Amino acid sequence: MKYSSLQEYFYKFQNVLYLLILLPLVAFTFLFISKPQQPLGIEELQTNLINNILMIAVVVDWLLAIGLFNSMLRSVRKLASLGLRLERYYIITVIRFSILSVSGLMMVTGFFFTGNILFSVPLGLSMILYFFLWPRSAKVCSDLKLKGDEREMVYYKKMKL
């Protein structure tokens, strides 16, 4: 990602993340509004199986996203250049939000096949999770363990890089 200032960095960064968040939300809203009341002729046993598999897959997906991010972040913290650390932080955060977006799309798929509105609960929890994981400047400083001038520069989005 090319950027000339930290303000531009965060602007481009957050726009990409907004798209990843909106994808499952728009898909679920579209299906909720346009979906007929009857599911695709799936029996109750199959519906329960789909519910259980998708709920387990979503939890595994969330844990995978958090674990993968934390393991990749350890190597990013060791890089010498702030610009390079921010570039890698962008990449691993987009990967984390992509994985979380896939879990949201799993919920949309479950709603499509079963018609069960309970799939909106994990989707809503994903939206809350996005809020806590959102890369604000203070969170970026905390995640990268920035100190001194680097912390001040990122926290207040100062100067060009």
Image (cartoon, helix red, strand yellow):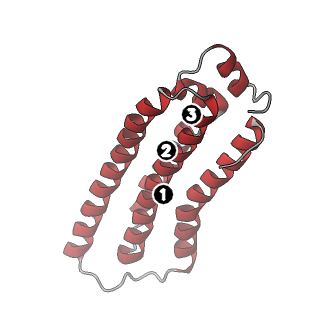
- Which residue has dot 1 on it? 101
- Which residue has dot 3 on it? 85
Q: Is residue 143 above or below residue 132?
A: above
Give residue 3's mark: none
Give the amino acid type for the residue marked by disc 3 in the picture: Arg
Give the amino acid type for the residue marked by disc 1 in the picture: Ser
Task: Name the mark nearer the viewer: 3 or 2.
Answer: 3
Q: In the visual, does 12 lie left or right of 25? A: right
> Residue 90's spot in the image, x, y percent?
57, 43
* Residue situated in front as seen by the camera: 35 or 68: 68
- Which residue has dot 2 on it? 92
Residue at 40% over, 35% down: 70
Secondary structure at numbered mark 2: helix
Q: Cβ–Cβ below 8 Å for labels 2 and 1?
A: no
Which image quarter holds the C terminus?
top right
> Residue 96's spot in the image, x, y percent?
46, 47
Residue at 60% over, 51% down: 17
Disc on the earlier residue, 2 or 1: 2
Cα distance, mark 3 to mark 2? 11 Å
